[in-house]
Amino acid sequence: MIRKIKFMLFVILGIAITSCEEDFLETRPTDAISAADALANEENMQLVLNGVHRGLYSQSQTIFPGGNTQRANNHYWVPLGDNLAGELIHSANANNLGWRTEMQWNSHTDQTSLTCELLWYHRYNIILHANLLINKATDGSLTESPGLFEILGQAYTYRAYAYLSLVQHYARGYLIGNPSSDPGVPLLFSSESPFTSEPRSTVQEIYDQIETDLNAAIAAFENGSGRPSGGPETKSQLNINTAYGLLARMALSKGDWQTAADAAVEARQGFPLMGEEDWLAGFNTNSLSEVIWGSNVIDAETTFFRSYFYLASNTFNGSQIRNNPKIADRRLVDAIPDTDYRKQVFLPDAPNSNSSAANGEGGWENNTNPLYTTEEEFNAAIDSIKSVYGLVSGHNTHPYMHFKLKQKNPGSIDPDDVIYMRSSEMYLIEAEAKAMMGDIAGAQEALRPLGEARDSAFDVTVFNTQQSMMDQIKFQRRVELWGEGFGYTDKIRWDEGIDHAADGGSGASEVLYQEAYQVERPSLNDDWIFKIPQAEIDANPKLTQADQN
């Protein structure tokens, strides 16, 4: 962190200002921009903040030295949660980006892997720039104003977001460990060179800092100017709802049920649940009514074959998808009632057209689906799927493939927005928190709006015990948030392992998944914890090999 972070500052400042403020360059060459100039006033501070927004989805090497073209930050980190948890299932071998290596649990368990290194440095990159903005905004040199409070609120929220991500990946889960003594991650407050780190703080200390920052963010936003009005691009700006949403996530992960429930209610205010047409439209834009926060990915800087949709959407025109359509756990899909329109995005009866499918059942000669009695019917079904969903000739199909995530322009490599937070999640957080408090009636009322919006026959009253309610909440989370990256943290919070073989099987191939086909629950298996980058241990005098997870 020490070696790289001191350079990252100037890269972000240069990017933020050169991309947003042409006049500034008339008097300041790019290589002469100083932190003092960048933080001189609200306008320039907003440019720094815009650089952080952009850094959420840009290829990492464009944002800081030491990055790599194979990772485009949250394009990779968001779907990684479901890739690791066995929710986003691979149907065949495919190349590129280590996505199969992640799925097989051979990446986050390796301290020299790109994933361990780049997730760490990206989150600390966010923390550094949040520190810059917080320290400047609170040192008394600038006149307090609604605009300054808005910047401060976003900076506090970003710092909390980054620390929550770090502690949930590089430390033992709060509810399954001993947070007062379990090692967390280093706390960094400095915004001055040489940006020296501290030793690992405890998990509890990190959570305390996250809560402090989110409460400070909410207070700042209450005095701020508010998120600007406009299109989907405005939702890249964090706001008070985002802060409440992160507070709800944090509190849920540590078992602070009342805070989680209360914050979730606040987070979803003003973001009504979307209807069937929007839910089935592909989750490719922040303009959906219930999107609280997301990156508006601009066409001018697309990530192409490094994008979220390249990794997870079956409409993307890339080899990762064409050769390896992503499928859902058939046990989950089969359990969705026919009266629930979300079932429409999964195709249990899609023909297996891939001769290289991991289950060895690809092609007409291996067909076992009684729906297709002739090769002509088999091929006609494939052609129909391609026509309906805009696939190109090279796309394979596979039973239980999904079309939840669909591009605006299917069959292309066009960029689409990356959604981070929706109001649906907040209903589910409130319901889970109340169920865990034993408030079954409260949990029923929290879950009712979402369940009834999605399933015309939904009856929440049948879930009248804590166990049945929690089972239903888990089911609803897996369906509603499928593909949005929550599987990893959910399984850690619930202390659940991965078993692709149980109850008739998920549809995953044991040959392809190898050791990740069955994974013991997190409380008994420290492989759920990401390795600290070896490069960080080598560069940081406050960390030693004894600090390795």
Image: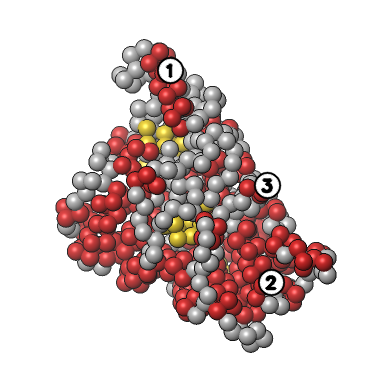
| Point 36% across, 52% down: residue | 274
**Which numbered disc covers residue 69?**
3
Q: Earlier in the sequence, mark 3 or mark 1?
A: 3
Tell me residue 335's x, y (percent). 27, 40
Dot 3: what SS? loop
The type of residue carrying mark 1 is: Asn
Q: As displayed, is residue 98 above or below residue 124?
A: above
Amino acid type of the residue tagged 3 in the rendering? Thr
- Quarter of image, res 403: top left
Percent of width and height locating residue 96: 61, 38
Q: Is 83 left, or right, of 414 in this rendering?
A: left
User: Number of callouts in the render?
Assistant: 3
Q: SS at mark 2?
A: helix
Q: Element type at marker 1? A: helix
* Residue 167 visible in the shown view: no
Residue 363 visible in this rendered orientation of the protein: yes
Residue drawn at the location 33% of the way across and 43% of the way down: 342
Residue 329, percent from left and from top: 37, 39
**In front of the other: 478 or 531:** 478
Q: Quadrant of the N terminus?
A: bottom right
- Give the x, y percent position of residue 129: 64, 69
Q: Residue 385: name its quadrant.
A: top left
Residue 44: which disc?
Answer: 2
Residue on which the image places disc 1 = 379
- Where 505 falls versus 285 (above or below)? above
Quarter of the figure with residue 158: bottom right
Nearest to viewer (mark 3 / mark 2): 2
Q: Are marks 3 and 2 in contact (CB under 8 Å)?
A: no
